[in-house]
């Protein structure tokens, strides 16, 4: 853009923009005020129309209250019509008709079973109307009821209904007096209110958009494609193919009927568009006048700059000897002298640049070769690391699956055999087998946790939790083991507030590890958990104190190392892999804390860890602790369960465990067999393995979900796959829950009770 145009633009903006902005703000305020006033008028008319319809309905109900009390009407229904006087009843029905002769379609007397015993339409006598809503609601309410437009079982079109219970002197309901009115009653009331406003139109709608009445002479649709929103507010919707704007109000006394007063959006916006056109014309005239003055002023101001630009262009073309004229103001003359000096310097430096350019070209080529070589090396290293990570994940997943599958069979069969054991010796031996299997499962879980931490895939899920509840829950898990060794368990939580924000699961895992070690390495005495403020008040400090064997000073440096214990003789005497403290250290550091050990005065150890756990915000609602699953066997009700499992031993364990709960069990050895069984039979629950030959559990679940009879059947994964990505795949396939093998009997029983009860 040239200097002349820049100066002209600046002057134009300074002169015109403020005036245009102020004018536009005034126009916008004027337009918005007119729109608000129009919306207010339509809102008031809508409220008046809704009130008029409500009053018309209430007047009809008042008339009906008087009609049901006419002498002889109740007597005609006493004793199943034993005292029925047809002449008297028909006279009463005719009297009711005269109250609204233009809109009444029929008046009928129904007995207490809903049978039409008298009707102004003779063809309707004897018809059963006991299932119609006007009959059932009048009986339930005990007083006259209005039912909005409703299409009866034997009616060709929707109608309005008034119904009032006919009662004996003692208050017993003998039958119902029913009045059927044309829906034109709504249109008449709507037209009466809108008559002073010929530019407005009106609708009476149901709560789902059904069009009950309209003041538009054209045939209305049965319902609106887009429903108006709000009540008493401006709303826009489509009516007969064109956008409309209006206001909506609910009819008093009827939650399902609304009045909409509206007009075409183009008609609503016409004054606005006219005012905007007028404003645009004014602004265009102002711009033309100012532009002429701006062009003259800009030309005079830009002339020195134009001359200097022409000189600079000659200099840029390579004409080093071309003089730059010194014209214009003092600033322009100084700029011209600077151009001349720059011309001399340019020639000298150009020679230097040409000499150095060749050297830079050589260095650049060498640098590009080095970057390409390093990039290739880094790409190869990255690919190698990614391949190693994938291989490690695959090995860990396969190892987890291959160990958990037999563990599931061992723990399941041990539980079944223990319950059936004939002697205490057998039960004790089976308890030891179960304990060994649980120990092996703990080692497997530790290895997987360590792998997740090393791979950076361990996610923290902070949430509000109670410090006291966390400590008590941990002590509850080791209480039996402590009692077997004669140890006392103590807790002392001396920090406020009690509710903190953190990952309770991981904090409980660390605390349980330390408390479990304290119980294992304490032959006698007590174990105490103390919770207080961290040093400097920057967090919470957890301490686990015991009176056990302690730790030698030379062994303390190795306490939290991977796969190590303080003394190798400890593993032979007490067991353990040395992973527990290593995982605890990594978890604490991952949560931004620190962990350590100190000898306890008088013997024993103090293991501690500190975490930055801020107080839970008051606005956060604490997550409720899930209720413990109900204990004891569930009473048999004969529900049917399909077990999908390719391992024969696990089939046996699942069948025996479920039959013990009183369930009927079918077994499928593959995904294809499971789909075939689901296609032929109904099931209350499906337990689905994931890894199977042929069709796996994910594909089988998607196929079962495609069957109409099993759209809502609970499907629970019961698998040895223990990784988070497996859980996500289960949810995406349509499964409702996820159980990781080995599944203990109480866990299986709780899952069955939860999902079978919801089926």
Image (spheres, rainbow, N blue to C red):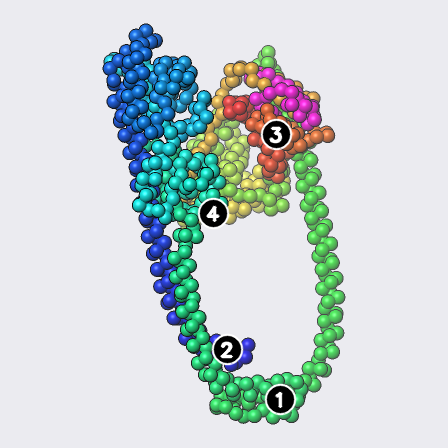
Q: Which residue is mark 4?
A: 242
Task: Give yes or no for residue 609 being in the magenta stretch.
Answer: no
- Separation of disc 3 and disc 2 at Cα? 69 Å
In the image, taking residue 701 as reference, residue 533 lies left or right, namely left
> Which x, y percent locates residue 284?
44, 70
Please give the name of the residue rendered at 71% of the width and 51% of the height, measured from the top-left corner.
383
Q: Which residue is mark 2?
A: 6
**Dividing the image into 4 quarters, which one contains the N terminus?**
bottom right
- Separation of disc 1 and disc 3 at Cα? 82 Å
**Earlier sequence position, callout 1 versus callout 2:** 2
Q: Which residue is mark 1?
A: 343
* 160 or 443, nearer to the observer: 160
Decide: is 411 above or below 196: above
Please give the name of the residue rendered at 30% of the width and 15% of the height, measured from the top-left corner.
89
* 529 or 748, nearer to the observer: 748
* 324 or 198, nearer to the observer: 198
Single out the mark in the foreground, 3 or 2: 2
Q: Secondary structure at mark 1?
A: helix
> Which x, y percent locates residue 485?
51, 26
């Amino acid at each position: 853009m040239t200097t002349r145009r820049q100066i002209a633009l600046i002057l134009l903006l300074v002169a015109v923009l403020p005036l245009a902005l102020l004018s536009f703000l005034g126009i916008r305020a004027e337009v918005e005020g007119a729109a608000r006033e129009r919306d207010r008028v339509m809102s008031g008319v809508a409220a008046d129309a809704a009130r008029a319809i409500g009053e018309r309905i209430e007047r009809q109900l008042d008339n009906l209250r008087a009609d049901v009390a006419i002498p002889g009407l109740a007597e005609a229904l006493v004793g199943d019509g034993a005292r029925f006087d047809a002449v008297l009843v028909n006279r009463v029905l005719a009297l009711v008709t005269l109250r609204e002769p233009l809109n009444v379609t029929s008046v009928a007397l129904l007995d207490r079973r809903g049978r039409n015993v008298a009707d102004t339409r003779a063809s309707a006598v004897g018809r059963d109307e006991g299932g119609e809503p006007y009959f059932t609601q009048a009986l339930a309410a005990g007083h006259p009821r209005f039912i909005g437009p409703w299409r009866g079982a034997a009616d060709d079109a929707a109608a309005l209904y008034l119904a009032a219970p006919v009662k004996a002197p003692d208050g017993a309901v003998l039958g119902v007096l029913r009045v059927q009115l044309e829906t034109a009653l709504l249109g008449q009331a709507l037209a009466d209110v809108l008559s002073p406003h010929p530019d407005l139109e009106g609708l009476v709608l149901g709560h789902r958009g059904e069009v009950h009445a309209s003041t538009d002479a054209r045939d209305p649709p049965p319902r609106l494609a887009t429903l108006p929103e709000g009540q008493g507010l401006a709303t826009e919707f489509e009516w007969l193919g064109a956008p409309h704007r209006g206001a909506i109000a609910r009819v008093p006394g009827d939650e399902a009927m609304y009045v909409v007063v509206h007009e075409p959006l183009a008609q609503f916006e016409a004054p606005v568009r006219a005012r905007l056109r007028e404003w645009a014309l004014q602004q265009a005239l102002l711009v033309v006048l100012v532009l002429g003055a701006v062009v003259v002023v800009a030309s005079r101001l830009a002339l020195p700059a134009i001359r200097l630009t022409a000189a600079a262009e000659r200099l840029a073309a390579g004409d080093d000897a071309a003089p730059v004229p010194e014209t214009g103001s003092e600033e322009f003359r100084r700029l011209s002298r600077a151009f001349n000096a720059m011309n001399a310097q340019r020639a000298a430096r150009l020679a230097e640049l040409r000499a150095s350019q060749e050297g830079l070209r050589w260095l650049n080529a060498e640098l590009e070769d080095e970057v390409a070589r390093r990039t290739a090396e880094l790409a190869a290293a990255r690919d190698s690391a990614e391949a190693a990570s994938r291989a490690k994940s695959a090995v860990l997943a396969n190892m987890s699956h291959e160990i958990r599958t037999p563990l599931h069979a061992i723990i399941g069969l041990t539980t079944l055999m223990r319950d059936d054991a004939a002697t205490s010796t057998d039960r004790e031996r089976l308890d030891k087998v179960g304990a060994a299997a649980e120990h092996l499962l703990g080692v497997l879980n530790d290895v997987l946790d360590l792998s997740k931490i090393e791979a950076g895939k361990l996610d923290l899920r902070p949430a509000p939790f109670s410090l006291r509840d966390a400590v008590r829950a941990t002590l509850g898990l080791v209480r039996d083991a402590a009692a077997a060794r004669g140890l006392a368990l103590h807790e002392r939580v001396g920090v406020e507030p009690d509710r903190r924000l953190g990952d309770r699961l991981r904090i409980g895992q660390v605390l349980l590890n330390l408390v479990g070690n304290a119980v294992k390495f304490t032959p006698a005495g007590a174990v105490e958990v103390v919770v207080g403020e961290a040093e400097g008040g920057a967090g919470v400090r957890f301490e686990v104190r015991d009176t056990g064997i302690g730790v030698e000073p030379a062994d303390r440096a190795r306490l939290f190392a991977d796969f190590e214990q303080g003394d190798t003789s400890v593993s032979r005497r007490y067991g353990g892999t040395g992973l527990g403290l290593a995982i605890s250290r990594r978890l604490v550091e991952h949560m931004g804390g620190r962990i350590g050990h100190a000898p306890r005065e008088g013997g024993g150890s103090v293991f501690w860890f500190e975490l930055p756990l801020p107080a839970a915000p008051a606005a956060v609602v604490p997550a409720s602790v899930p209720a413990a699953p109900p204990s004891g066997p569930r009473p048999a009700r004969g529900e049917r369960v399909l077990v999908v499992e390719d391992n024969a031993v696990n089939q046996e364990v699942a069948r025996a465990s479920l039959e013990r709960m009183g369930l009927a069990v079918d077994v499928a050895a593959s995904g294809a067999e499971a789909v075939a069984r689901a296609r032929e039979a109904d099931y209350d629950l499906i337990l689905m393995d994931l890894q199977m030959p042929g069709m796996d559990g994910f594909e089988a679940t998607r196929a079962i979900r495609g069957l109409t009879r099993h759209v809502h059947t609970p499907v629970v994964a019961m698998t040895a796959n223990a990784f988070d990505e497996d859980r996500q795949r289960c949810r995406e396939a349509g499964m409702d829950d996820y159980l990781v093998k080995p599944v203990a009997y109480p866990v299986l029983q709780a899952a069955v009770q939860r999902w079978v009860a919801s089926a």
